[in-house]
Amino acid sequence: MVVLPSEDEMEMLSAKGRAIYDQTLKAILEPQYNGQVVAIHLDTEDYEVARNSPTATRALRARHSSGLMMITDIGPARIDSLTLRMLGSQILSESGRSGGPK
């Protein structure tokens, strides 16, 4: 049985991902990849850039079969709510539950 993180834990994971992006990846990725997305493996800080989140997720998951990932937009239009949705979606998919409408 997979235990889902609490809201506080989700906020900490999101903050960790934002810190990795802001402190390390922003200077590498902006402005060249603005408008694309980056998937960040939170344990290793490895990342993958792609035009869409499924492509970035698959490529990064091929290198890291476990662990949490955060996906966010690259550039000034980054949307933190997307980050939280992707973390939540990943946790639900790893637990075998569907996050979609019933």
Image: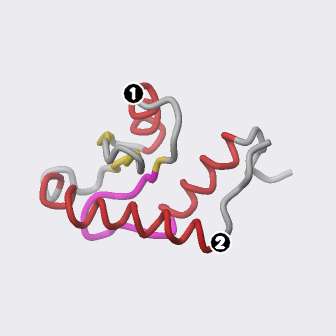
45 or 31: which is nearer to us? 45
User: For the residue labelled by badge 1, is the local secondary structure a helix, a strand or a loop?
Assistant: helix
Q: Residues within 10 Å of mark 1 (few under 14, many from 20)?
A: few
Location of mark 2 (residue): 7
Q: Position of residue 69 (x, y in %)?
A: 47, 47
Q: Position of residue 12 (x, y in %)?
A: 50, 69
Residue found at the very far right of the displayed protein = 102
Per the rendered image, the range of residues in magenta is: 70-82
Residue depicted at x 21% and y 55%? 25
Separation (CA) of disc 1 from disc 2: 28 Å
Residue depicted at x 29% and y 42%? 49
27 relative position to 79: left or right: left
Residue depicted at x 55% and y 55%? 87
Vertical arrangement, residue 6 with respect to residue 69, above or below: below
User: For the residue labelled by badge 2, is the local secondary structure a helix, a strand or a loop?
Assistant: helix
Location of mark 1 (residue): 63
Q: Which mark is residue 72?
A: none
Q: Position of residue 66 (x, y in %)?
A: 53, 35
Indicate the amino acid at tag 2.
Answer: Glu
Q: Position of residue 94 (x, y in %)?
A: 67, 40
Tell me if residue 81 is in the magenta stretch: yes
Tell me if residue 5 is in the magenta stretch: no
Residue depicted at x 35% and y 43%? 44
Q: Residues within 10 Å of mark 2 (few under 14, many from 20)?
A: few
Indicate the amino acid at tag 1.
Answer: Arg
